[in-house]
Image (tube, helix red, strand yellow):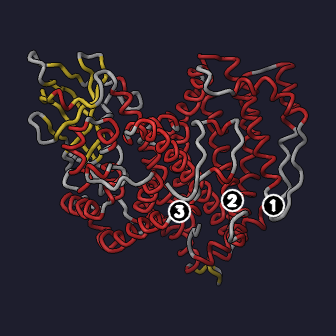
Amino acid sequence: MTKQEVKNTDGGMFINQASDFQEIFTPEDFTREHKDIGRAIEDFIKGEIISRGEEIETLNIELSKMLMKKCGDLGFLGIDIPEQYGGLELDKINSAIVSEKFGYSAGSFAITELNSTGIGLLPVALFGTVEQKEKYLPGLASGELIGAFGLTEPEAGSDALNSQTTATLSEDGKYYLLNGSKQFITNAGFADIVFTYGKVDGKYFTAFIVEQKWEGVSTGEEENKMGYHGTSTRSYFFDNVRIPVENVLGEVGKGHVIALNALNMGRFKVGALCMGNAKSAFAEAVKYAKKRVQFGRALCEFGLIKEKISKMAIRLFAAESLAYRTAGLIQAKSEELACLSGDTGISTAKALKDYIVECSINKIYGSETEDFVVDEEVQIFGGYGYIKENHPELAYRNARINRIWEGTNEINRMVIVNTLSKKIGDGTCNLMQSFESVFEELEKLEPVDSDESGSLNAQTRLMQTAKKILTFVFGKAHQKYGKALREEQEIIGTISDIIIEIYAIESCLLRSQKMLKGKKIKKAVIPVEMTKVLFHDSFEKICFLAGILLQAMEDGAALEKDLKMFRKFMISLPINTVALRRNIADAMIQRGRYYF
């Protein structure tokens, strides 16, 4: 993959295992190939997208198709497609880079591209037969074909397996008759291929490859959406569509395997896209704050504006760190499995399944970071941010969908805990073994009450404590509810929030430690300060959420005993966050953008 060797760990195991900064991938490990891909996309966007921005946002289908063809000619659509089928077969780091770069300034076209190269292509790339791959992948890689993913129905959104679409095998066994509808499908207005799902005989949830030109396939009118006006979003209607049996994707009754793996990759890519969107909003906010003068001073000179800039930058650093950490893990696992099976598609699907927790975190943290950043961008622009034709208004509207599609953030929070609970149940996660001794360990631990300038020793100790706190409260929940934990959604959501915070702060910690040990130590100064501030805020949040969980699960003497033990950790590490935030903001203002 790269000079950087990423250690293979099982998905989700970061929750109770120590990680080493030498064993993760960070943006500082980008190879020349990674940087070249990033620059190529930036050049494409500057040359082809930015000047057409307004036209793209009006949903010009012919323009979108033309731009997709140009993307295909440049190889951007074939990043995840094997070379033998016309793709570049690059690593998952490149996949994240492509999504991030298109998110930065491609507007609605980013969603057209992301959808076609993600969930509109990966089902056949990962699970297709050789014949299916030969038939469809070259066209999808070149831009001659555009893909769509038809899963959602009027009565089956998050509950996707409740599909009402049916598929009935013909008497001669040569084709299926597909009947039903799909809703809110991106690219439906001009897609050539749609990967869709229906229940064979009303029971067996199955994936199909449908060509949009086939008789019986029709689409509804374009949806009038809040944001991403330049994307096509329509319903599909299937009226006795004859699907050849060779267009069944995977096995009959195993459509959920294909859908969930495609969504895992979609979540991974959406997280990167949101990071790009947020970086763009941040750059616009800083640019405006530097030129807008009030009370005789530039906005960026005011303390509360600096606080906003620092908060946005810290969130971006965390989102970026966990996104590329996740990319490195998926890539390393894919390579290991490919050596065993020789099939890159199946190995990637297995890696995505293994890192379902990290993919869900990536999607949640990326989309919520984008929402936070664009909201602060509007606030910095003030009244101008609320007016159309200005960047914040469009960014704010476009951002909102990212917490909904690819599984709502609520569903993804449930996925995180339910996946880990399943691992505990089948013995692949040893969290309950740790739970047996963690209370005694926490009782003996002293709170971290001092910080060292230029060092992350205190944060390393806080990280260890945070994981013990998570182990304790997760273990309590698993012990109290067992399999019924799946029904305790408030508990699940709170545990997930702790897990997300831990993955974010650990990713920042490991990345900053790596930078401190690198050749350019001066470049680590601001990341170290961002990590310190993030730990200060997140550790308090983790302790607060743990307290909520204990109060929901316990009462009486048991609750008092546990809360008494927890109270000693609820003392903030004494650091001057005001001074650190000013340093962080000044560094970003000086460069006019997020620069890591």
Q: Which residue corresponds to the image point at 26% horizontal and 26% vertical from the top-left?
A: 198
Report crowding for label 3: few under 14, some 14 to 19, many 20 or more residues within 10 A (C-alpha). Answer: some
Q: Are marks 2 and 3 in contact (CB under 8 Å)?
A: no
Q: Dot 2, how many residues are within 10 Å of its Cα: few (below 14), some (14-19), or many (20+)?
A: many
- The numbered mark, 2 or 3, whose residue comes first in the sequence reads 3
Query: Taking 491 as reference, is 453 left or right?
Result: right
Q: Nearer the viewer, residue 505 or 353?
A: 353
Could you tell me which secondary element the residue under label 1 belongs to? loop
Residue 559 placement: quadrant:
top right
Q: Which residue is mark 1?
A: 455
Q: Is residue 225 visible?
A: no
Q: Residue at x 29, y 39 (%)?
A: 124
Q: Nearer the viewer, residue 273 or 233?
A: 273
Q: Which residue is mark 2?
A: 514
Work out which quarter of the rendered image holds the C terminus and state it. Answer: bottom right
User: For the point 81% across and 47% down, which residue is it?
Assistant: 461
Q: Is residue 463 left or right of residue 29?
A: right
**Which of these two is toward me, 318 or 255?**
255
Which amino acid, mark 2?
Lys
Label at residue 30? 3
> For the residue marked with disc 3, what is the amino acid?
Phe
Q: CA distance from mark 1 to mark 3?
A: 25 Å
Q: Does residue 219 appear anywhere in the picture? A: yes
Q: Identify whether 391 is placed above or below 478.
A: below
Q: Nearer the viewer, mark 1 or mark 3?
A: 3
N-terminal-most mark, 1 or 3: 3
Q: Is residue 10 left or right of residue 272?
A: right
Question: In the rendered structure, are the residues bearing label 1 and label 3 in contact, judged by CB atoms less than 8 Å apart?
Answer: no
302 vs 254, nearest the viewer = 254
- Residue depicted at x 41% and y 42%: 405
Q: Amino acid at mark 1?
A: Ser
Callout 2: SS: helix
